[in-house]
Image: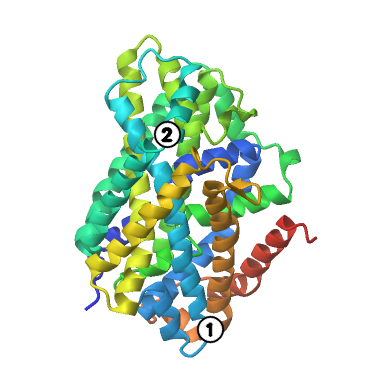
Amino acid sequence: MRENFGSKLGAVLAAAGSAVGLGNIWRFPIETGRNGGAAFILIYIGCIFLIGLPVMLSEFVIGRSSQANTAGAYRKLAPGTQWKWVGRLGVFTGFVIMSYYVVVAGWTIQYAWLALTNQFAGKTAEDFPVIFSQFASNPWQPIVCLVIFVWLTHYVVVKGVTRGIERWSKVLMPMLFILVMGLVIGAVSMPGAKDGITFLLQPDFSKVNGPVVLNAMGQAFYSLSLGMGALCTYASYFNRQTNLARTALNVCVIDTVIALMAGFIIFPAASAAGYHLQSGDIGASLLFITLPNVFQQAFAHLPLLSYVFSLLFYLLVILAALTSTISLHEVVTSYMTEEFGFRRSRAALVETVTCMLLGCICSLSFGPLQHLKLAGMTIFDLFDWTSSNLLLPIGGMFISIFVGWYLKRELVRGELTNNGTLRVRGLRVLIFILRFVAPLAILGIFLNQLHLF
Ligand code: TRP
């Protein structure tokens, strides 16, 4: 018998847990900084609701109607066709994302440790870049951290759907929300926070171009966990009473709110510490160079507050990342359990060990392997770029085509209305978006990126 999430709340929190992660707290502020602030955010929100929400609903429909892992789902719904490759692509993408995701997730463990042992105290702006580059380029320290992270994930996944994923999501998600809330209040009330707030609220549309839109869409897919069947896998554990439309809307809203809140922690705090928001300062190193410094400078006279802020912040990032790696892991684990008949613990072990090895390679690309480049990117950057700008949008495009064109309209309607017991409006609009808007938007932005227009 397949397991189900025990409650509606559990289902929403598990899916939201998958969505909310490093994508919100680490990647969203970076993309926002690079792509010009408020204007990017508006486009991003547009992508979330216009394309992300319909694609999420598609994943829900595929998952719950098939009651199978993401590759099995296509086998069941489209037997004898090549659609199963969309599922397999998703499993492959799962490996790729998980492998570099755990590197960054591992760094957060180290930083939580540094915060806990009060090692940021008395450090200045010059010290933080050194601390970070020494740590990240060290051949073994980050690997120890990533191994810890992979095993934390493994532990939860092996426990199963209700006792592992659902139970942990129910604890971790509310904790995360409270922490974020506290940090936002702390950050926006710092003296000098105003520039950061303006940066997030005053759009400058002159900065918007093709790549900015592609980045916004890639970020939307990434942040919502779309395009590789993670939510499809979770939806296969939804019970028959779950309202798919409402669940999807809740997840999109929670995810967007948390991303915005992360922005309202990071940018106000950075401007309070005197950073130039438009410059490269707010780059990839944001979470690990800018922020620890911010926490020190902003509360220079109140070391206890610096301590508490830093510690809570890194704990929060760990929690957010963990609920996401759990969902990445589950895609592969359920695939191997159901398609190859592995025991759950065995299947999980295969994924855990593979990602640990690939993760080590990604991690070393900040140190000994930093000169090894493919297409001008280190292995880590290559994994990140291919998954979010290539594999996820391609997956998302096929998912929307599958539900928009291939699946019977009755099946889609039946899933969305729980066989006629719920009233759901906008079904026509949804199908229209899935048939035309989403695939064409994804394709167009894609070709633009490849400079084919
Ligand atoms: N959405 C997660 C984040 O924002 C990352 C993630 C988890 C993900 N599962 C995924 C991204 C599946 C794409 C696909 O951090």
- Residue 358 at x, y = what percent? 43, 54
- Looking at the image, residue 50 lies above or below residue 223: below
Under circle 1, the secondary element is loop
Q: Nearer the viewer, residue 250 or 278?
A: 278
Task: Tell me the number on the disc at residue 138.
Answer: 2
Residue sitting at 33 percent across and 37 percent down? 109
How far apart marks 2 and 1 lie (CA) works out to 44 Å
Residue 292 in view: yes
- Residue 409 at x, y = what percent? 51, 84
**Mark 2 / mark 1, whichever is N-terminal:** 1
Task: Tell me the number on the disc at residue 82.
Answer: 1
* Name of the residue lying farthest toward the bottom: 80
Q: Nearer the viewer, residue 160 or 262?
A: 160
- Looking at the image, residue 79 lies above or below residue 133: below
- Residue 340 at x, y = what percent? 32, 78
State ligand 1's quadrant. Answer: bottom left
Q: Amino acid at mark 1?
A: Gln
Question: Position of 292 compared to 315: left or right?
Answer: right
Question: Position of 231 compared to 384: left or right?
Answer: left
